[in-house]
Image: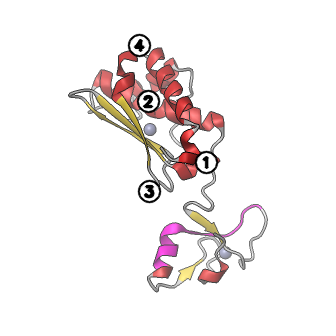
Amino acid sequence: MKQNVGSSTQHIHDWIGFALDRNEVNYLSNMIRVRWNKQFVRRFADAGYIAVPPRGIIRISPLIWERALETERRETIIHEACHIVAFHLYGTEIKPHGVEWRQAMVNCGVEPIRCHDIPLIGINRFHVQDCPKAEADRCYVSRNKLAGLKRGQLLHCSICGMRVDQESIEF
Ligand SMILES: [Zn+2]
Ligand SMILES: [Zn+2]
């Protein structure tokens, strides 16, 4: 565990435990591992499951975790734990966000929605200083396009189309 997110670890395990409890599969608790994944710049978290022997893993973006509200963190962990529950009970051939997963979420009293809407500015999008759009809907470039600039490609603002150079990106 990373130091700056380490204090969250107990919560994470409590929330996983809650989801398992509500779905009556408590015995899975010591078969689920949690890992931080810095590569996740858009995805908040994901879950994997292997049936034999039963083993689940939840991977979380520390970058997005840092800026998420407590309720968003909780719902995300329950969301991922419910994937493991559904895969465990119904097999890995089910649709990830199908009826089995939705029922597991409902059992936890959590609305079965699929996406977070945590702003990703500074993670996978970066504001552009000199663009005409200021204030609320500011201009940005994506992390991918920025990588292209570093490889020598021309970079244009995703919103207004203005040519952008490295100096005008806000990191
Ligand atoms: Zn999901
Ligand atoms: Zn722009």
Q: Label 4, on which residue?
A: 24
Q: Residue at x 61, y 37 (%)?
A: 72
On the picture, is 130 further left or further right than 159? right
Q: Quadrant of residue 33?
A: top left
Q: Nearer the viewer, residue 171 or 146?
A: 171
Q: Label 1, on which residue?
A: 66
N-terminal-most mark, 2 or 4: 4
Q: Residue furthest right?
A: 135
Amino acid type, callout 1 = Glu
Give the mark toward the camera: 4 or 1. Answer: 1
Classify 10 Å Cα crowding around label 4: few (below 14), some (14-19), many (20 and above).
few
Classify 10 Å Cα crowding around label 3: few (below 14), some (14-19), many (20 and above).
few
Tell me the quadrant of the picture where the C terminus can be found: bottom right
Q: Label 3, on which residue?
A: 39
Query: Disc 4 versus disc 3: distance between alpha carbons?
Result: 33 Å
Question: Which numbered dot is residue 17?
Answer: none
Q: Secondary structure at mark 3?
A: loop
N-terminal-most mark, 4 or 1: 4
Q: Label 2, on which residue?
A: 81
Amino acid type, callout 4 = Glu
Residue 114 shown in magenta:
no
Is residue 161 something that shows in the picture? yes
Query: Disc 3 versus disc 1: distance between alpha carbons?
Result: 14 Å
